[in-house]
Amino acid sequence: MNVLGAVDALTKELSTVINRTTVNADTVCQLLLKLATRGDGVPITVVLDNVRYQKCALVHQYAAALNIELLYLPSYSPHLNLIERLWRFVRKECLYSRHSATFDAFCTAIEHCLATAHTEHRLDLETLLSWRFQSFKKVQNQTV
C-alpha cells in the first residue's frame, strides 16, 4: 500500500492518492490535480522533499499548467515537512501495538485514520502540525 498525501496547513485536511503499485511522477501529478480541483480559488503552494520523481520535468510542467507553485525543502530536513509529522501520527495510531488479521484490514485501518484525522483527531493535529519552527538565527553561545 502506497499513500502520497498533502496536508492543508490551515485546515489540516488531507488529500491523498492511494495505490498498491508504486509512487512515481504520475502519482504526484494525480495528487496535484486533486489539489487543483478542490475549488478553493486560492493560490496553491505544495511543499515537497527532494525525491527524484517529485523534481522531474513532468511534475514541473503539470504543476505549471495547474498554476501550482512547487517549493522544495532543503535536503535532510524532514522536521520541516508537515506531512512527515502526519505520517508519524498515522504510524502511531495504526501500527504501534496493533494487529490486522489481513492486508485488507490493515489498509482499511490506515485509510480510515487518514479520512478522519482532521475531524476525530483535530486537537492532536493542531499541535502536531503547527507552524512553530525553531529558528537558530539568534543563538547565544553559553560557556560553562
Image: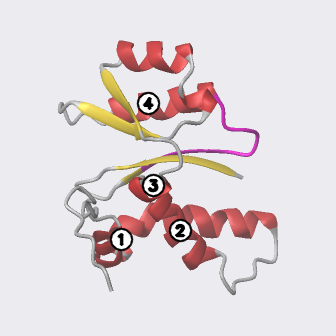
Three-letter code for the amino acid on which mark 2 is drawn: Arg
Marks 4 and 2 sit apart, C-alpha to C-alpha, by 23 Å
Label whose residue precedes the other's in the sequence (3 or 2): 3
What amino acid is at disc 3?
A: Ile
Q: CA distance from mark 4 to mark 3?
A: 15 Å
- Cα distance between the residues tagged 1 and 3: 10 Å
Magenta stretch bounds: 15-24
Above or below 95: residue 26: above
Instruction: Bin the neighbour count of mark 4 within 10 Å (Cα to Cα): few under 14, some 14-19, many 20 and up.
Output: many
Q: In front: mark 4 or mark 1?
A: 1
Residue at the location (51% across, 21% down)?
Answer: 59
- Which amino acid, by three-letter code, is at mark 4? Leu
Dot 3 falls on a residue whose secondary structure is helix
Q: Tag on residue 83?
A: 3
Residue displayed at 53% across by 62% down: 87
Q: Which residue is situated farthest in the right direction here?
A: 102
* Element type at mark 2: helix
Mark 1 / mark 2, whichever is N-terminal:
2
Q: Position of residue 111 (x, y in %)?
A: 57, 61
Instruction: State if disc 2 and disc 4 touch (CB < 8 Å).
Output: no
Residue 69: image x %, image y %? 32, 26
93 horizontally vs 41: left or right:
right
Residue at (35, 19) in percent of width and height: 66
User: Badge 1 local density, few (<14 within 10 Å), some, or many (20+)?
Assistant: some
Give the residue at mark 1.
Answer: 128
Q: Are marks 1 and 2 in contact (CB under 8 Å)?
A: yes
Question: In the image, residue 107 lies at what x, y percent?
Answer: 68, 62
Q: Give neighbour class at mark 3: few <14, some 14-19, many 20+ (Cα, 10 Å).
A: many
The residue where tag 4 is placed is 32
- Residue under circle 2? 88
Which is more N-terminal, label 1 or label 4?
4
